[in-house]
Amino acid sequence: QVQLVESGGGLVQAGGSLRLSCLGSGMIFRLGAVGWYRQAPGKQRELVATITSSGSTNYADSVKGRFTISRDNAKNTVYLQMDSLKPEDTAVYYCNLRYRWDGYWGQGTQVTVSS
């Protein structure tokens, strides 16, 4: 069974930075693609960034140049470095693992950016 635990969220002023972590359990964590998603109140969950098992990355246009996704397979952890944060980045951020036909979600971590 795979478990994903997000951490690193919090309250930050606009222009500040946060680093989110997604700690995964199970062997398949290293084999799968991991994504960060976010959901703001009243809005649909949206993709923020993804990273494959080989390290290829992809970003939503809204975060390109500000956010960086990375992974440390030795620590079973995927990171999301968020810089130049804006109030519109406020949301619950979720970690997602996809491996073959299965998908797994973490419980989410709240990020609040004040203006």
Image (tube, grey):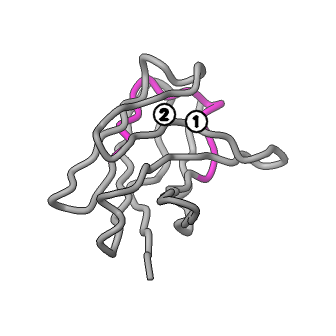
Residue at 59% in and 34% down: 89
State the residue position of label 2: 13
Residue at 40% in and 61% down: 7
Q: Is residue 83 magenta?
A: yes
Residue at 52% in and 66% down: 106
Q: Which residues are magenta?
A: 79-92
Q: Residue furthest toward the front? A: 100
Residue at 21% in and 55% down: 73
Image quadrant assignment for residue 61? top right
Q: Nearer the viewer, residue 62 or 34?
A: 34
Q: Amino acid at mark 2?
A: Gln
Q: Amino acid at mark 1?
A: Ser
Crowding near pointer 1: few (<14 within 10 Å), some, many (20+)?
some
So how many labels did they put on this image?
2
Gap between marks 2 and 1 measured at Cα: 5 Å
Q: Is residue 111 above or below residue 103?
A: above
Is the Cβ of the residue at disc 2 closer than 8 Å to that at disc 1? yes
Q: Is residue 27 above or below residue 66?
A: below
- Tell me where residue 66 appears, x and y as whole percent: 43, 22
Q: Earlier in the sequence, mark 2 or mark 1?
A: 2
State the residue position of label 1: 114
Q: Is residue 65 above or below residue 37?
A: above
SS for callout 2 = strand
- Tell me where residue 60 appears, x and y as whole percent: 57, 26
Give the left or right position of residue 23, taking residue 86 as reference. left
Q: Residue furthest toward the bottom? A: 1
